[in-house]
Structures are given as C-alpha cells and as structure tokens.
Image (cartoon, helix red, strand yellow):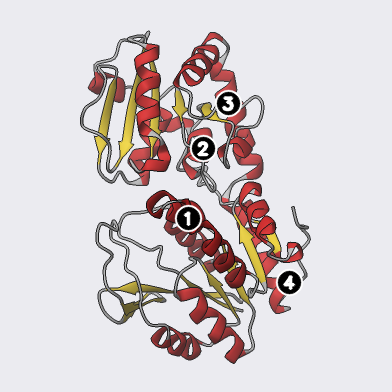
Amino acid sequence: MHLTDITIFWTPSCGGVRTYLEAKRHWLAGREGIRSSLLVPGADEGVKFDVYTLPAPRLPFGRGYRFPLRRRPWVRRLLSLRPDIIEAGDPYVLPWAALEAGHRLGVPVVGFYHSDLQRLVSTRAGHWSNRWLDRYILRLYSRFDRVLAPSRVMAEKLRGLGVPGDRVHVQPLGVDAALFHPDRRDQALRRRLGLDHTVRLLVFAGRGSREKRIPLLLRTMTELGSGFHLHLVGSGMPRRLPDNVSRSNGFVDSRRLSRILASSDALLHGGDSETFGLVVLEAMASGIPVVGVRAGAVAELVVPGTGLLAEPNSADSLAETVRRLFAGNYTAMGQRARKHVTDNYTWDRVLNRLLGHYRDLTGHGHSMEAGRE
C-alpha cells in the first residue's frame, strides 16, 4: 500500500500537523508492505526522502506557510506518484487536487479536518462569512471517502454542517511518550528563572496567536500573584508581561520543550477553541497536570483526575482553579495524567487505529476494528 499525504501545513518550524506527519512517516517506515510519500509546497520543485515539493508563493505573515494557487501541477504530480490512497490535510486548494487525482486513479481520498476553517476566517473577516464557509466546508468534505477529525467537537461540527455522519470518524493525534517523560525534569529551569522552591511554576507552550488567549493567561497571573509564576514558550509572545510571567520567545524544539514541561508544576491553557491541543498531551506525558477551560478539544483530553477545568474566558475562574489544583495532591494528578496518555495516546496506539482506516478503504490487510465515535 502506498499512501500519499498532501497539505500546505508543512513549515520549517514544527506545528501540530507537521508533528503528526513526521510521526506517521517514521512509524509507517517500520511496517512491511507500506510506503508513504508527502507532497507539500516549497520554494522550488524537488524530492528528498519521499518528500516531494512543488513551488508555491509564501504567505505574507504566514509563519513560513506557502499557498498554491493552481490545482493542475499538483494533480499531475499525484498521478505520477500513483498512490493507493491519498490523505488531504488542509481545506484550501490541495484537497481539490487530491479529489481529482483520486477520481482519475480510482483510489480513495481521505480528508483530515485538522483546522477549524470557519473559526480561522471569521476571526479575521467577521462572522458575515460563516454562511458561505458552511456551504464550502460541506461541499468539500462531503466528497471525501472518509473524513477524519482530531476530536469529538470537530467531528460534531462537521456532522452539524451536513457532512454524512457515516463518513466522519474521530482520529486523535498522539504523543511521543519516551521524549515527553517525567525523567526530563531539570531544576536548572527554576534557577534560570530565579524562582524559590515554594513558587508554583506554570507553563504554556504554543503560538502567541489570538485563539491561544494569552491576555487571559496574563490576567490570571495578575490575580494569582507572587506565589505563582508562568513561563510562556513559543513565538509571538507579548513583550510587556506581569512580574510573575517570563517567556522563551521563538521556536523551541521538541527536546527542549520536553525539559521545560517536565520541569514545571502544571500546564496552564486558556484556549477555548482548540481542535485538538497537542501540547496538553505533551504536558500530561511529562507527568504534570493541566488547568484548562471547559470548551474545545482540551476539555476532552483533561479527564477527571488528570487536571482541572475552569470556565472559558474568565481570569477569576482560571485563578481559582489553579489554587484548587495546588491545594490538592497535584503530583499524583500528574502521575495519573501520564498514565492516561500512555494508555490511550501514544503514537503506536493512535497510528494503528489510523492504519485501520487506510486498510478499510483500500482493502489492503484486515478491515478496521475501531468503530465511529
């Protein structure tokens, strides 16, 4: 079986989709009888280790993303690769190329709904665009042989728009539980931040974009005061910060992030519109509990005993939830969080489930055992 992934979500700095694609390619490379290739935009045409690039212009202020404008070259390249199954990982030009190539090759095409297109556009263009977007999403995703969504909230959104329910499946992402591990804990982080051992160290990792609700986290820290410290990790973080907040601005690789997470006491996450929340799994695998909000996909990951949930968009509720976390046995909660991840969200577990989808659609190997959610 030959799988080809096609997506614009491939940049030098690692995002959630790139993490998924790299983990999948590495995992599939160890499976006999399976070949995977990846087709993504680049500065020019080329191929390296089964990663094929076609030229596309860079998006202004797009953090390295490139946006293809014409479908035809991508159809031609897919036809030349002759995959047995195609997975399209974005909702723009490339999935239409995947659908056309799949039709001409007579092979199934999977659409993975990684990003909430409606939210992305409406936050920039306003809610007037929602009706048009609803029609577009329905028209596109109803054409796929199978639609994968990383969380129940995303799957229900697609079904609510009218995408046939029998085609929509929840397919979570995973985490490298060997890399994100409590043994990565390093007291040097506290020393570098100048923190006393009595200060509770919170961490947030991700882009400083609007949907991450960084201002909400800053208001929460002002409420909490000097007994708590928040360390922000990622690009686009604000420069003006309360006294009990610090930052590691810019891209942080996975190895360094694993040390920061394991060296913290808890993850603080105020985002209420996450499609999955990969950093939540990374924190839990690192042996720390999570304080999040009751909205979006984060609420699906933080099950009882692994963290606590606050009301959305409320600094008072977040601050009170943080205090409640540390008033209890938060270290035991972190241990349960790691067990929850290793029981349910290792890459081996989630990718075996994904492979079941591919086999079910192509007829290569046994039919999938996991049902829809």
Furthest-left residue in this view: 239
Q: Position of residue 246 (x, y in %)?
A: 26, 26
Residue at the spot of label 4:
360
Q: Secondary structure at mark 4?
A: helix
Q: Earlier in the sequence, mark 2 or mark 1?
A: 1
Q: Earlier in the sequence, mark 4 or mark 1?
A: 1
Q: Which one is in front in this view, the residue at disc 3 or the one at disc 4? A: 3
Residue at the spot of label 3:
309
Q: Label 3 sits on what residue type?
A: Leu
Occupied quadrant, residue 259 = top left
Residue at the spot of label 1:
128
Q: Which one is in front in this view, the residue at disc 2 or the one at disc 1? A: 1
Residue at the spot of label 2:
272
Q: Label 4 sits on what residue type?
A: Asp
Q: Label 2 sits on what residue type?
A: Asp
Is residue 285 placed above or below 43 in the rendered structure? above
Q: Earlier in the sequence, mark 4 or mark 2?
A: 2
- Residue occupying image coordinates x 58% and y 75%: 34
Q: Earlier in the sequence, mark 3 or mark 4?
A: 3
Q: Position of residue 145 (x, y in %)?
A: 67, 74
Q: Position of residue 143 (x, y in %)?
A: 64, 75
Q: Earlier in the sequence, mark 2 or mark 3?
A: 2
Circle 4 packing at 10 Å, graded few (<14), some (14-19), many (20+), is some
- Residue occupying image coordinates x 55% and y 60%: 131
Q: Secondary structure at mark 1?
A: helix
**Does residue 332 show up?**
yes
- Residue occupying image coordinates x 44% and y 21%: 315
